[in-house]
Image (cartoon, coloured by chain):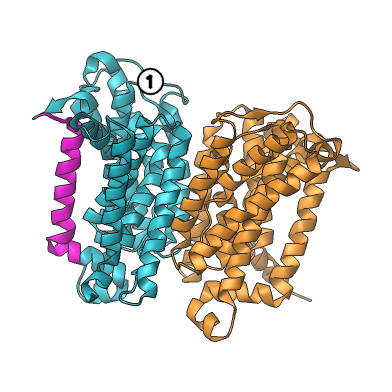
Amino acid sequence: MNKIKENFSIIAFSILTLIVLVVFGIFSEQFLTVGNFLKAFKHLSITAISALGLTFVVSIGHNDMSFHYFSCFSAMTMSWLIGLGFAPVPAILLGLLPAVLFGIVNGVAIGTFKLPDMIVTIGLGSAVYGLAYIYSGGSYIYRNFQKSGIMELNNAVVLGLPLPVIFLILLYVGAWVLLHRSVHGRRFYAIGGNKKAALYSAVPVKAYIIAAFIICAVLSSFTNMIQIAAQGKGYLKGGLMLLMPSWAAVFVGISIFKKPTVYGTFLGAFLISIMQNGFTLLAVPFYFMDFVIGAVLILSIIISSLEMSSGSKKVKKGAQNGAS
Amino acid sequence: MVPAKTIVKTLFKPNLILLWVLFLMVFFFSTQSAAFRSVENLMEVLRSCGIIALMVLGVTWIVASGETDISFPEIAGFASMMTALLVKNGMIWGAAAVLAVLSGILYGLLSGTLITRFRFPALIATIAVGSLAKAVANMINKGQPLYLQSIDPTVQFLVYGKVLGVPVLFILVVVVYLLAAWIQDYTTTGQHLYALGENRKASLEAGIKEKKIIMSFFALSALLASFSGVLLAASFSSGQPRIGGSFFIDGLTTVFLGAMIIKAGKPNVLGTLIGAIIISVLSNGITLMGVPYYIGSIIKGLLMIAGVAVIVLSKRGIIK
């Protein structure tokens, strides 16, 4: 009985996922097919990779409201380089450079100078988003997109799996090892738990904060590049839609496992994405998807707090509020 | 007699730096553009800061009490669609506005409940509620704007009218803000709100009714956001489901810039009003100078980071 109580959220979440799968399976013939699952995973990889980066920032107890703006800038940099005639791989790597730079700026401002994270990330995000307009003034970049091969980033199939899904698996396994099977992971959580205690335990706190913001910026930029490759044109506002689902995925994960985890984030992203996929198959219009995000979030909040009120565990608040 | 040196020192205190920035900005744009310095344009600047100033007044207090609200732009978008829908179906403007505001408040109550009852971080609760509001706003007309034939003259007057050359909207904003400033600085609610922001546990032990206050702030924020949504519907002659996105950055920038004025680091209503004017001056001046508008977003971002750096570092005594 105690076991059930302890794992209430996990059980409730599994039942919820099962119900979702069964209901969509009944209403849509295509839903429970291999082809559809590959498609769903391809769609999932976009938000899941971005949410993975955010998991690191939340695990050190900070907020990031800028990664989606950085991803716009990086993806536009990549599109611009493609337009200049660069090959896909150098264009992607060079495009990720500014993301690293912005991650460092975020990390130094928040970790080293201890400025409030909400203000810094929104300020820097706003500035970088404005800067992203310099490449094309806000219009699409089409040049060289078809012939450069950049679209393979989304379309290629390796070992029977779409390339984005391969990235999804590799990045999640890598992040799982980093956060849950290495000393670095302990340190991320230590900083999130108590910064001063971590510092006195000889954890290089500042370096880890910078690292978390770099990981967040780079992963969201990379996932936006996949999205741009899927669209077949450099599109400035493409990255903006990453913000809400990424936060939602991370927090659904927190409400299941009581702390930001790699597997929790994955399950959160999975639940949201599979529901969006199911509704798409049922021909529900696109603007309904925000409703799915909101509803899943609220439901997971309530499930998680039901468990708390039964009094077994305490939620470890992942995010502190910024402007203090 | 206060020595002149002290007066000069007071004028250059870190918490007044953004006022100087505003002053220099107005001065600079005035020298660069004849169109900017005309009285008519300056009044237009004041008018156009009105809607955003109303939208983020509640957010100011929410942030000051240590919470976050990012659902306000979506609630405004929802209220603009709701108003348009009701007016389109033959309701008079006044009733439509009241109904839109009342239904907007429901979102605030929902965020408040999720935060106070279910103890989840405000950021995530408002992300959830914002997503719901956005989705409902889009459902009203299948994701399309809803255009209106006519605007009620009273509402028209509220948005575009002038009394003695001063925009009515700005007068309304000043009245609301003065009232809010009084509540903030001369009532116990105001004291409680900063106490909550300073130390949540200590405030609870001191008997401050945290849940009630937080709940009412979120309801207030939703009320003001929906009211500005009604004004948006009037000023665009349409309901715009996706208007929210454009107010997200500007709204939070306003609050955070305002936090650096007067109370050095704490959001306060007069600061927010000045923040709204700064943003309005910036976008107006940049448009009139023919500079691409995205330069404005770069300047705003840098201003915010520089401002918070000055305030935080001066508090630690690194900058004097």
Seen in the picture, residue A178 relative to B116 is either above or below; the reply is above
- For residue B149: magenta? no
Residue A216 visible in the shown view = no
**Which residue has dot 1 on it?**
A141
Q: Residue at x 14, y 43 (%)?
A: A170
Mark 1 secondary-structure assignment: loop
Q: Which residues are magenta?
A: A160-186
When asked about the image quadrant of residue A292, the answer is: top left
Residue drawn at the location 30% of the way across and 28% of the way down: A78
Find out whether residue A182 is within the magenta segment: yes
Q: Which chain is cyan?
A: A
Magenta stretch secondary structure, dominant: helix
Residue in the foreground of this view, choosing between A94 and B87: B87
Furthest residue to the right? B164
Chain for disc number 1:
A
In the depicted structure, whether residue B154 falls above or below residue B320: above
Left or right position of B73 against B49? left
Chain B shade in the render: orange
A73 sits to left or right of B303? left
**Type of the residue with mark 1:** Ile
